Image (cartoon, rainbow, N blue to C red):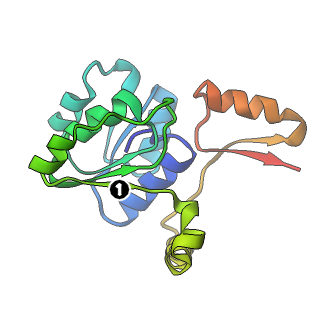
Amino acid sequence: MLGAAGGVGLTAVQIGAALGAKVIGVARGAAKLAAVRAAGAHQVIDSSACPDLRAALRDLGGADVVYDPVGAEPGEAAFRALHPGGHFLSIGFAAGRPPALPLNHALVKNITIHGFYWGGYRSLAPQALRASMQGLFDLFAAGRLDPVAGDTLTLDRIAEGYALLRQRQSIGKVVITL
């Protein structure tokens, strides 16, 4: 999971672990890696100290599923570490641009690429949205999800919250209270 210490990343790590996946979390720095481990990742990779993410992922056994909210080069590297028959989930582009995925690899390795905008399911498939929310609430009620609010700021500090996100300093969700 790329961006594993972010607001959606930590939840994705928890969901993967709760569903029995061997989760490899990719994040930047010791504090973020500790949060990713605490969320249930089996292995972690420090992206700030990793010159070859593809090789690092392959050294840990590769991936059946890549969860990518980052995009750009990290997304491309993780895509190349997918096993044949794998799934690439494009969640967002925190790095500023989508990954340039080699579609010939998708063809030869039978990789499925999923563009996933969860909010779009309100109109596309509202029943799927309700079912996924119910699944999340069930995991939460069973004590298998523990949402992480890294920073809680008052509305007058909203600029600080945006700065935490832009500078990639946040861990978990940044919550603004009214």
> Which residue is tagged 1?
114
Q: Is residue 158 visible?
A: yes
Numbered disc 1: secondary structure: strand
Classify residue 155 as left or right of residue 145.
Answer: right
Residue 173 rendering spot, x and y as whole percentages: 64, 46
Which quadrant would the N terminus be assigned to in this image?
top left
Looking at the image, which residue is at 45% across and 42% down? 4
Classify residue 92 as left or right of residue 51.
Answer: right
Q: Is residue 46 visible?
A: no
Classify residue 104 as left or right of residue 51.
Answer: left
> 164 or 32: nearer the eye?
164
Count of labels in the image: 1
Residue 55 rendering spot, x and y as whole percentages: 18, 29
Residue at the farthest left position: 108
Specify the quadrant of the image occupied by residue 56.
Answer: top left
From this view, report whether residue 19 is shown above or below residue 53.
below
Residue 36 rendering spot, x and y as whole percentages: 45, 42
Q: Amino acid at mark 1?
A: His
> 156 or 146: nearer the eye?
156
Looking at the image, which residue is at 64% across and 32% down? 165
Specify the quadrant of the image occupied by residue 17.
Answer: bottom left
Looking at the image, which residue is at 49% across and 76% down? 128
From this view, report whether residue 51 is shown above or below residue 61.
above
From this view, report whether residue 135 is shown above or below residue 80.
below
Residue 83 rendering spot, x and y as whole percentages: 15, 49
